[in-house]
Amino acid sequence: MLDLTAISVVDNHCHPILLEQHMSGPQFRQRWTEAKDGSLAEKHLHNSVYYLWTIRQLAQFYGCENTEDAVLAARDSQSGDELLARLVKAANIDALVLDLGYPPPEISYTAEYTAQAAGCRTVSILRVEILMQQLILQYENFDEVIERLAQHIKRAREDGYRGLKSIAAYRTGLNIAEWSKDEAAAVFAKLRPQAVSEGSLRLAHKPLNDYLLHVVFQAAAEQQLPIQFHTGYGDSDTDMRLGNPLQLRDVLERSDYQSMPVVLLHESYPYSQLGAYLAAIYPHVYFDLSYTIPFIDKLEMLAFTRQALSIAPASKLVYSTDGIYMPEMYWLGAVRGRSVLAQVLQEMIEADELDEQQAYHLARLVLHDTAAELYALLP
């Protein structure tokens, strides 16, 4: 079997961890499911293959009994900083590309503190829907919202961001259409007074969402700024039918957007073959292989990794965990990702598709080099 442990990873998409790392059993369990209803974590999660594997791996890492209680006791004996540093070092992580849109910043590590505590590099991604919501609440004139939005995207790098992220799949779907300014303005005029009155806004109004996303795309294309899209698997808040990456075809076909690198997150699961196809067809599309979330077993991860490498060039594939809340997710994804990628590449060597030198080259592209170039992390 190929040994990929010496290849450091760039985690192309992950989230900050929580400031408070000590938690109860139910709280810990809830972190390992996308289900919103807590009864699933309480009654069923301990019977899932992924969770059973997780507890076993963490027990081995912490040198404790293979039980949830023992794992919780072992991690509670350490501070959050100690957990983060230990797990990141063991995972051989070079850099974390952090989506700061969630969890809320007031309960999470900052990107800067994460780098300091973990001993690795961090860069930040700007979640565009949150920015759009803030601007709508802040400005009563729609033209000013548009102008400010474009300005924010054009100076994103200056403000310290290496890319953008859209959760359109969670809000109105990836079938991002073109609407007239008047149609978007009419939604804005109806929506804003209530949002201001309530002091908050969840932007899920299609003409307005789509119109503002096109403002983002135009500015991002001018800056050659990467944008990540949530695709496929998510919690019950997302309509999976509209999370199919093929829904992005109209956006991908726009010639004036093709200087904007597009990253399809979460291997578009269960639409993995379709996402890999898009990365094989469009020069500006990249396909993310996420090895912590979705919470699926190794056999499924082997399947989507085979599909991705069989369809798309490895220089269009990027590794991630989507790790969130706890540093264990960063480590588990690195363990699993290297293992799965090594097994698939070994199979390809045995099938005489690759030789060993070529396999290591492809592994370095997936685990590190492609994302390092995409987010300007190379020396």
Image (cartoon, rainbow, N blue to C red):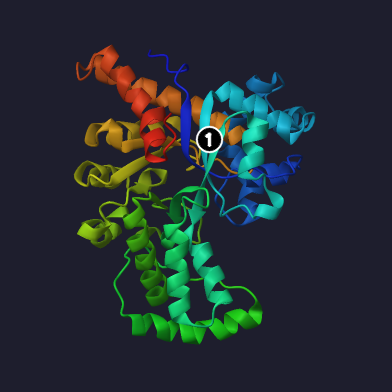
Say which residue appears at 66% left-offset and 28% top-offset. Answer: 85
Nearer-the-camera pick, 63 or 255: 255
In the image, is residue 199 above or below residue 311? below
Tell me where residue 86 appears, x and y as whole percent: 66, 25
The answer to whether residue 270 is seen in the rendering is no
Residue pointed to by mark 1: 50
What is the secondary structure assignment of the residue under circle 1?
helix
Nearer-the-camera pick, 218 or 82: 218
Say which residue appears at 51% left-offset and 82% top-offset. Answer: 191
Tell whether 35 sits left or right of 43: left
Nearer-the-camera pick, 151 or 109: 151
Tell me where residue 11 appears, x and y as whole percent: 48, 35
Looking at the rendered structure, the kind of residue marked 1 is Tyr
The answer to whether residue 208 is seen in the rendering is yes
- Image quarter (top left, top right, bottom left or bottom right) of the N terminus: top left
- Image quarter (top left, top right, bottom left or bottom right) of the C terminus: top left
In the image, is residue 260 above or below residue 170? above
In the image, is residue 135 above or below residue 274? below
Say which residue appears at 47% left-offset and 53% top-offset. Answer: 234
Say which residue appears at 46% left-offset and 57% top-offset. Answer: 155
Which picture quadrant has residue 78? top right
Report crowding for label 1: few under 14, some 14 to 19, many 20 or more residues within 10 A (C-alpha).
some
